[in-house]
Amino acid sequence: MKNKLRSFILLTISLCFCLSACKDTPTTLEKTASDTELKSEKKKEEPIKSQLEKKTPTSSKLSSALKPNERIEFGKMYTDTVNFIRFDDNSDYWYFLVQKNKDPIQIMYHADIPINELIKGDKILIEWEMKSLQEAGDENITYVKPYLVSFKKITSTKPSDKNIKVLWRETLYDESLKTDVNTIVLNKDYQKSIAKPERAALGYVATFIGNECEWDGKTNENRSNLKCKLLSYLDLGYQCSDKHLNFLKKSFSKDTVALKKLKRCRTIPNTATVQSTFNTISMKTNTKEQTILINYEVTVINMREDNVSSYTKIDTFKYDQDQIILLNSEKIDNNSSANVTDKNNNSFVISCGSGCAMTYSESKIVSENNVKEVTFKVEMYINEKLSEKYDQTYIFNCDASNEGIQLQLKGDTNYKIEDEHPEIQEKLKSYISKLCNQ
């Protein structure tokens, strides 16, 4: 009996332990269900956090090609000078493209900002900030882009009709010298809207006439730091610098005379023994005829000979969308001294602008049947001073059976008279006609 009772008590205790264990330990099914719930909750939290990060990126993650070396911050205004390229309105937001440091950059703007006033190549000063916008129809996709707040046109590539004074002289008080000084004054209002062809025409004229040129600091060994007032106004850098000459060579790429003259760019500071300076510059632009007329008065000072003279020059330029040439140049000597003139009946003179003249004088003629080989002595004068001389030989075919007269430049198999400056073309054709009819 006692054994049966003991067995019953032990069995009861064992059952109690089993029931307790079952109560505290979940089944495999319950455990799996619980883990799934936790994972689901975690997955719900992750996209929300990710979306928040996308909508409000931290400043440490922001950058822009407009400021490649800076950390960009939300809510901060930035300014930059860029070149306008084109509109880009093929998306839900309005964009336009600009160029800075040779890189195209996309900028958002609002329809109320008059970007349509700009054309390709315009230089503009922009004020912008970084903004984040949502994709239309999908708020989980955001864009972080520079956003235009305002802009101001600095230079334009498209000329407009005008007749203005660009430069003049005034006597102003110089604080550093503590005295009145007669100095060049430039039209600041015009600088904001100067067009590319006008910049090229004025830059060409300014290349060969002094415009208060001073060394920027100590003179470099290669004389590459001469800062001139009008060239700086035109944003062309130092006198005869790569920035200065590359712009003009590209603009005058079809003007052979201008290109030859630009090769002889010289740095002449306002302390030179012989120097020239502008007194006035006025400009007239005719968009219908696509011409730019620059009228300027120059004073030449020769301290070596204790002599001062002056002249007035009228240069007429012809331009199109990409190119410009010096069409004609007329010089009026205010001192009535002799200008460069023809040396004989079979020679001619052309004006290459800005105090430049070139004389072509016959020095040798070799004839064989209807073919004539003529060597000219070419002399280039800058401000009435001989700067360069060389020989140039042309071969003329006066065969009457040909339509027109054939012309070649000796030693140049690719020569075409159409590539010459218009005034040289005219003078050569007139010379050939007279030569072949002798």
Image (cartoon, rainbow, N blue to C red):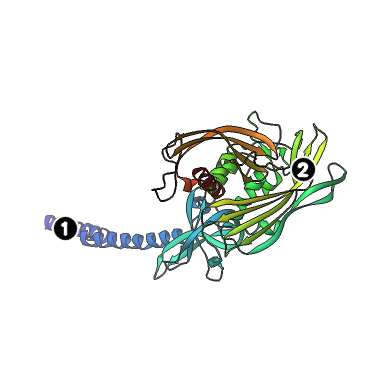
Q: Residue furthest front?
A: 438
Expressed as whole percent of the image width and height from the top left, the position of residue 68 reads 52, 47
Q: Nearer the viewer, residue 51 or 182?
A: 182
| Residue, disc 2 | 337
Q: Amino acid at mark 1?
A: Leu
Vertical relation: 320 (above or below) 136: above
Label 2, residues with CA under 10 Å away: few <14, some 14-19, many ≥20? few
Q: Amino acid at mark 2?
A: Ser
* Residue 307 seen in the figure: yes
Q: Residue furthest top?
A: 221
Q: Quadrant of residue 31?
A: bottom left
Q: Nearer the viewer, residue 400 or 409?
A: 400
* Residue 68 seen in the figure: no
Vertical relation: 141 (above or below) 105: below
- If you read the primary sequence from the N terminus, does the residue marked by circle 2 or circle 1 appear first? 1
Viewed as shown, does residue 332 lie left or right of 293?
right
Quadrant holding the N terminus: bottom left
Label 1, residues with CA under 10 Å away: few <14, some 14-19, many ≥20? few
| Residue, disc 1 | 11
In percent of the image, x 24 and y 57: which residue is there? 21
- Between the residue at mark 2 and the residue at mark 1, the CA separation in whole angstroms equals 140 Å
Query: Which mark lies nearer to you, 2 or 1?
Result: 2
